[in-house]
Amino acid sequence: SSRFSCVEAAPPVEIFALSRSYKEDQFPQKVDLGIGAYRTNEGKPWVLPVVRKVEQQIATDVTLNHEYLSQLGYEEFSKSATKMLLGNDSPALTEGRGFGVQCLSGTGSLRVGAEFLINCAKFKTYYMSSPTWPNHRLVFKNAGFQDGKLYRYWDASNRKLDLDGMLEDLKNAPEDSVIILHACAHNPTGIDPTKDQWKQIADIMEQRKLFPFFDCAYQGFASGNLENDSWAVRYFVSRGFELLCAQSFAKNFGLYNERIGNLTLVFKDSSPVVNVRAQITLLVRGNYSNPPVHGARIVSKVLNDATLYEEWQGHIKEMSGRIKEMRQALRNKLEELGTPGTWEHITNQIGMFSYTGLNQECVNRALNLYSFYICRS
Ligand code: PMP
């Protein structure tokens, strides 16, 4: 028998399994509401025109080559990505106490960050929102963290943020816990704290000495405005927090499969920077050695050219605008049909995810009777 018969069965990744079933379904009116990827009016993926344009320039630029990047990636990219997150004149950057590391999209940035926190900085405990993007747990587990703890987030009966529950759970978290926070467009609930609520969260985290690890997968994609969507991160920096933030360029650049991301680290002063860079260099070296360049070239060209940048701003406004229109249209239709229940939450939520309030039975019926491919949660 095979040496590998000891390998245990493992469950499929739900959202990718849903996507496979969708592809196999022959029903012409099938609807794909699974994986968070932007679609056009025709239900097709959209390569941003500015990305196409830059790819054409890259393809014909004979000065470019396929030499290795360093472990920390393409510096021009990571500098621009960090500026995009924190603002061009952020004191964290002008004072040399913040920097970025190019990683493998948002997920890879979370993973490098989590490995750094547990292996090099002696963090032990982490908290995530209930509910959260399911991969947070797997990424932190594989990085070496014990099972994560949850803080309350979603108030199911009122379909809003459970701020009191969240604050109470943060108050009770042990000092030095890592708290995963969604920078904007919370996945999966679509509910973000207001500015005033973020202030209350920051107050507790400061008092309790909790460590913020922001997950920023949707900057610009939520409100159409980069500054708005990174407000929470910038606010925490302005309050003097040390923090990490994982950035993804999958959604806002439509570069899902290029795995382009950035891990931003901010410290109180610049004294840890040299050692931290050296440690992350070794973490990456022993993992994937160095990241790929294609997505980094595209993003940094766009972020550093005024004309391309403006074109891209138009694209993120178009995508975020269309998402808002779809929410409004869905709500209008539900209300027009007199569908039982209230539906304001569809338009109060932001970003591409919606906690509809449909129960398991509704979801099963939608799938089995109408080929609506929608997550069980
Ligand atoms: N965090 C959250 C909350 C997400 O929704 C996603 C994308 N689904 C990611 C991180 C990372 O995605 P990627 O690795 O493709 O950038």
Image: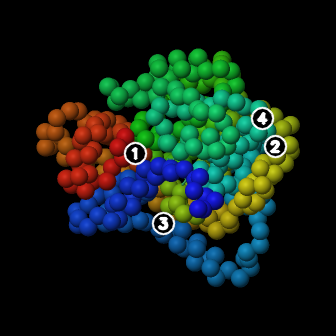
- Specify which label sits upstream in the sequence, 1 or 3: 3
Of badges 1 and 3, nearer the viewer stands 1
As shown in the figure, which amino acid type bears the numbered disc 2? Val
Q: Say which of marks 4 and 2 sits in front.
A: 4
In the figure, residue 216 lies in which quadrant? top right
**Residue found 65% across the figure and 63% down from its top:** 296
Residue position marked by numbered label 2 in the rendering: 276
Q: CA distance from mark 1 to mark 4?
A: 34 Å
Amino acid at pointer 4: Ala
In the image, is residue 84 above or below residue 130? Answer: below
Residue 39 percent location from the top left of the image: 38, 61
The type of residue carrying mark 1 is Phe
Instruction: Report whether residue 26 is seen.
Output: yes
Q: Position of residue 57 (x, y in %)?
A: 61, 77
Q: CA distance from mark 2 to mark 3?
A: 35 Å
Could you say which is closer to the camera, residue 103 or residue 266?
Answer: 103
Judge by depth and name the residue closer to the eye, 153 or 24. Answer: 24
Secondary structure type for disc 2: helix
Return the mark for residue 121. Answer: 4
